[in-house]
Image (tube, rainbow, N blue to C red):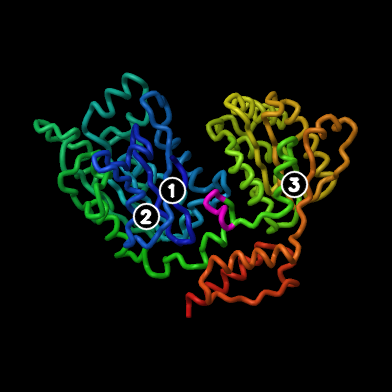
Amino acid sequence: MKGWQKINGSDTVIIFIHGLFSSPEYCWKNKATNTFWPNLITQDSRFKNPSVFLSQFYTSPTSNDYGVQECAEEVKGQLTRVDVLGNRAPITFEKIVFVTHSTGGIVARYILEQECELFRDKRVALFLGASPSYGSKIPFLARALSKLTNHQLSSELTWGSEILKDLDGRFRKFLDSKKVNICGVEAVENKAPFRIPFISSRVVNKESAVRYFHSKTIPDSDHSSIVKPDGKEHQSHELLLDLLVKNEFLSKCNDVGLENSPVLFDRYELKHEPYYFERAEDHKLTLMLSHYSLWVCGESGTGKTSSILRELFRRNVNFKYISLASCLECSFHEIFDTILEQMAPELIDCIPTSNINSSISKISEVIDNAVANGSYFLFIEEIPIKNIPMFNQFAEYLFSLITKINGGSNVRVILSSIFQPNSEFRLEQEKVSERLKILEWPRWENKDISQLIDLIRSNLPSDSTLELCMSELNGNPRKVKEKFREMLMEIGND
């Protein structure tokens, strides 16, 4: 369930970070009322329609020496990278709200303090739900487990542990430095765990839970229920709302207007199918992909990515999306390490690899493991190839990868680039070239552009008229949508 719960054109994103031995599915759900807090926020008009992201980190009784630092690194990666569908990274939003439970609050504070440069030009809000900022005094939650299983994270959550004392001091200095525009609130649990009457100790007492911001004790809440609202009037839900309203995270300028209409989508998802204009090139892509791996080449903004994603979604296959946009000046070894890292982030300790052949071998192993469960498609775009010599060298490594994959016809590699590669492969590459074909992606014809404009107009208000010059559009559907967005924003500002 991790990833985007909702993404739109809002300038605010709410990021949920769960606690110890939990997950996005369990942490925020009230089973009695079947209320899921992230959904509750998207359904509450008072929150002004923010984007919502669910983070997740590895936490289990057998996680061994996977401590606070490792959890923070895992979450930071999710916040800073484009997802498999090409959706923007959460860190790119102007206003960032962290909603955290227990250990999740420690992870959020660690990221904010350690990676403060990422947030320097942002506005940040921090909701700490029963977070043991100075640790927990209940021994069976931490000491016993850490001794029995060498569970580092539990050990680090004990009262006054070295890492928590250090983080507490550094975070206070971070707040005093005002390097980041940050506000926050701390929610305090009211009852002992499991509602056992004769136990008075709370999992996180007030001394540990109230250290940095204004606080509020949530009545009739225990350590778990404090972040499981049963409705819009639950005090945890209202506490978060009050924090964001007071600090103008949900101002009117944050409303999502017509310029973010689904008909103006950038990256395809199945929900966009009614607004997709199908061309002859789409049919050609479908036919070729049924038999070959593909290298699709064409100008930026002509719809390569949307067409490929549409085909993958419609086939309902297991696929992995990789973007090499960050590899413009990278070596080929670094490029293949980036592919490996995005394909299998759990192998991060093995990256960088010793050499490019090692990278290729590990990538092929990941693919072979994935294809064991059925067909597998690897989609790589933004390939930083600038000239023929670069293409020849990249092709050599690519063909080496293809020959190592054991999945055969169950595996497809789809590459996308602006650069148009050679259609003639070298003699030693001819056997592999039988499995990889080049598909040139042309600019749109004027008749197709005209029909796209009609489709967009039919899904926008009748007064959204716009005169478009075909020569300015240059066969580029992205420019069409940009023109409509500009027009709609002007209407909204009038």
Mark nearest the camera among 3 and 1 is 3
Q: Residue at x 42, y 45 (%)?
A: 54
Residue type, mark 1 in image = Gln
In terms of secondary structure, where does tag 3 sit? Answer: helix
Indicate which disc, 3 or 1, sits on the residue closer to the N terminus. Answer: 1
Mark 3 is surrounded, within 10 Å at the Cα level, by few (under 14), some (14 to 19) or many (20 or more) other residues, namely few
* Chain part drawn in magenta: 269-275
Which disc number belongs to residue 160? none
Q: Amino acid at mark 2?
A: Thr
Lower sequence index among marks 1 and 2:
1
- The residue closer to the viewer here, 287 or 167, is 287
Residue 81 sits inside the magenta stretch: no
Q: Quadrant of residue 459?
A: bottom right
Q: Which residue is mark 1?
A: 5
- Kindly identify which residue carries mark 2: 42
Q: Residue furthest right?
A: 427
Q: Is residue 411 above or below residue 72?
A: above
Q: Secondary structure at mark 1?
A: strand
Crowding at dot 2, Cα within 10 Å, few <14 / some 14-19 / many 20+, comes out as some
Q: Is 274 part of what is drawn in magenta?
A: yes
Q: Are marks 1 and 2 in contact (CB under 8 Å)?
A: yes
